[in-house]
Every structure is written in structure tokens, then in C-alpha cells.
Image: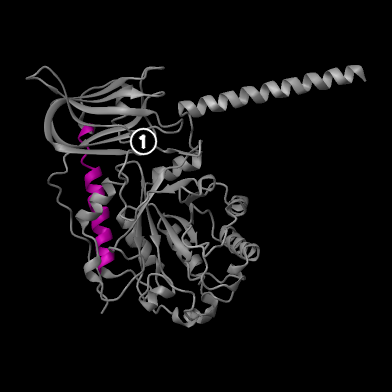
Amino acid sequence: MASYSKIRNLAALILVTVMALSYSQAIGQDAGGDIQPAPYQVAWQDLEFGVILHFSTNTFLDREWGDGTASPSTFNPTHFDPDQWMKAISASGAKYVVLVAKHHDGFCLWPTAQTAYSVKSSPWKNGKGDVVGDVARAAHKYGLKFGVYLSPWDRHDPRYKDSAEYDRYYNSELEELAQNYGDLVEFWLDGAGSGGHVYDFKKIIETLRTYQPNTVVFADTGLFEYGDARWVGNEAGIVNYENWNVIDRHGYRRWRPIEADTPLRKAHWFWHPNDETSLKTLHELLDTYDKTVGRGAQFMLGIAPDNRGLLPDGDVARLEELGAALRLRAQSNLASRHAAATPEVAAALDNNVDTFWSAPPASRHATLEINFDQSVTFDHALTMEWLNEGQYVQKYAIEIWSDKEQKWLAIAAGEAIGHKKIDSFAAVTARRVRLNIISSSGSIRIREFQLFDWSDLRVPQPSSVVIEK
């Protein structure tokens, strides 16, 4: 017994010591900002541009917010064609779509077994239709990843008044979506509304993760423990601050990259009749792109099919214009013309995001220089940080060499680089350009450093668009 007691005490001492060391290491990592993304977060950030689709009874009632009283008979698109949606979305340059499977009004766009308030009670396809399934198949056909939005707020279902009963209902709906429509790239967990209802977010995530371990959960920063991505804080689709992927909430830190959502039509998420003037211009969309993707965030563009079940012709044309402009801009990378460079430097100039330049080990300041055989003129720079092991660059400058002054001159500067940073400035001409990492809290790795002249891009007109009369 004495020997057993000594062994037990020794084991307890070892356990306490290991726990103390682990705690110390965790605190040290937090203090140093050494927080890494999950692999599925890295893959999601590489998608950069997504679309969220709003299409429901609101579409037929000229509403933005339904109150749950609309009859299922309201939902009856006559020319429902998700292939048409996905063709236009793919042309825009987007890489994934999130469908609002149930908005706050409670109407479900799939034949759920949990309620009759769904497409199975509508005249569309004699109640045999499944919008979620059709949209998921169309998305995959056009090479787009698919996700869903399932509003926790439900203004129709009477079970909403009973938190426990409604939570069972909601999680049963979530199980259907998570099991029956393939891999979900993103799950939108919107906290809008509540009416005093307390959501069991822990259980919601447990349910999702049972079937979809690699889905990025989008949630407001307030739902801190339950999200993989966070809201930017506005619906203008603009990051107005230095973008750090690690967010501190009550002393607890997590990797929570930003998704910045904004509708294609000003202030409208759902389609409305006689509303052509609200369509955003190409210039507005490119500006938004530069202030989302160009500031390290995801660009989430709101698209709304009309009451026919088609994207309006103007929306299709604008999406094609956007995609053409983004492709044209990407193809004009001047850094690809660089003079001879070491393989290490060339890895950041090769238009390949799977390669990267690394500064010398343990360095916290370094420069990446591009040399040209002839001077080039440019007005934008694009920089990408390799984030798999964390976000470390804390201050940087983009500089050109002045032969006249015999020194480096800064033309742009900032703090966070993150996934992608697009800097714009007055056009400059130089033969030597460098990215000067002034300070970093960890290893410096740059996936891409690119230069562009976007001052006079001629965006081709959209391909022929069939106008529905």
C-alpha cells in the first residue's frame, strides 16, 4: 500500500507539472501572438470572393424582412434556373456561394421533415421541389463551393417561444442540411433578432461538426467561441481598420478572419421590382473589392434572383463585367517581368500562391527586392503573407530606389498585410522596387509581391445577354 501511495503521489506530481508547463506555454504563445489557423480556414481564405443568395417568399412580396405570415402559395417561380445564376456567378470571379436556406420568416427552401412551412407546401413543382438541392448541384456543376445560411431567428414557428423545444427543431433542420447536400464550405450563423430567445450556440456547432468538420462557421464577433470567421461590422463591404486575423475577446484569442458582406444592389438583399437604379457600378464593385480582398478579408457579394427564378439581366451583365475586370487586372502583373533573381526571391514573383519567399531564420526585419532591366510604371502593389503558421508582419513599406537622391523612397506603408494587401498610390516609375518588412513578430514569409498599372484598364463589354421581355 505504501509503494502504491508513493506511485500515486508521484503520478499526481508529474500531472500537475505537465499541466503547469502546458498552461505556461499556452500563455506564452498567446502573449506572442503565435496563433495558427486551421487548415480549412486557410483554404477558405484562399477562396477570397463569395456570393450569398437571397431568394424566398420575400422575393414575391417586395419585402426585405418577412414576418412569418406569408402563405407558402406565394412561392412560385415560373422560370427557376440555378444554372443561370451559377454561370453568371462563376463569370464574376466568385469561388463559392452561400444560399439562404431559411431566412428570419421561417420559410424553408428544402422539403424539411420538421415543418410544413416550406417549398413542399408551395405550388412550385407541385410541392416536389428542393431549392437547396438544385442550387447545390448547379454550384458544383460550375466549380463553385456551396454553403448555407440557416437563420436561428424564426418569426413563423410557434416552437420559437420555447427555447429547448425550438433548439431541438433547429438542430434537426441543421442535421438535414449538413447530411444531404454534400460538403458545406461555409455555414452562416446569423444572430439577427431573438425576441428574448437564448440560443444554444454550443449545441448548434456540435451538431454541425458531427457531419461537417471542415465547414467555416461565420458568426458575429460576439459569438466568439462558435465561429471561424467574423463579420466586418458593416454592410458596405469595407474594412475600415488594420486587419488582424487574431481577435481578442475577454482575454481569449482566436483566429477569426473577416468576411465583408454587401449587396449587389444598394441596400437590398432581396429582389424588388422597378429597382434598376440601385445596381452598383463596376467602379463601385472594384472599389469594394480592393477594400475587402485588398485588405485581407473575404468579399461576400449579395445576389438576388427575381420572381421568375432568374438573375435580372442587368445583374448578369454587371457580374460578367466584374469578372472580366478582375481577370484583366490580374493578368497585368509587372513583377513577372523581373530581371534575374535568386530562386528564393522568384518564389514571391511567380504568380503561384503555393510558393513563398522566406526571410533569413529568426529575422524580424527584411527586404524583398525586385529589379527590372528597364524602368516600369505602376500605381498599385499587391502583397500576400503566408499565414499557415500565423500572421506576423506588423509594419511594412513599399519603396522605390531614386537614382537622383541615391536612396530608397517610400510610396506606401501600413501595418497588417495578412492574406492579401492591395496598396494604391500615385503612379511612379522605377527600375528597383522593394518590400521593406520593418518589423515582424515572427518568421517572415511572403507568398506574392506584385506590381500593377491599373490607371487605364479597358474592360471588355459583357458577352451577349438575352433580355427577357
Display coloring: one colour
| Relative side of 302 to 18, left or right | left
Q: Give the quarter of the figure containing the N terminus.
A: top right
- Rendering coords of residue 450 (x, y %): 25, 34
Return the residue found at the far front: 196
Residue 137 part of the magenta-drawn span: no
Which residue is located at x 59 percent, y 73 percent? 158
Q: Is residue 293 visible?
A: yes
Q: Give the quarter of the figure containing the C terminus.
A: bottom left
Which of the two residues, 422 or 457, is positioned nearer the viewer here?
422
Return the residue found at the far right: 1
Which residue is located at x 31 percent, y 20 percent? 366
Which of the two residues, 61 or 300, is positioned nearer the viewer here?
61
Q: Which residue is mark 1?
A: 418
Numbered range of the magenta stretch: 314-335
Residue 334 part of the magenta-drawn span: yes
- Rendering coords of residue 387 (x, y %): 42, 33
Question: Where on the picture, by quarter, is residue 262?
Answer: bottom left
Which residue is located at x 39 percent, y 32 percent? 386
Q: Circle 1 sits in a helix, a strand or a loop, which is it?
A: loop
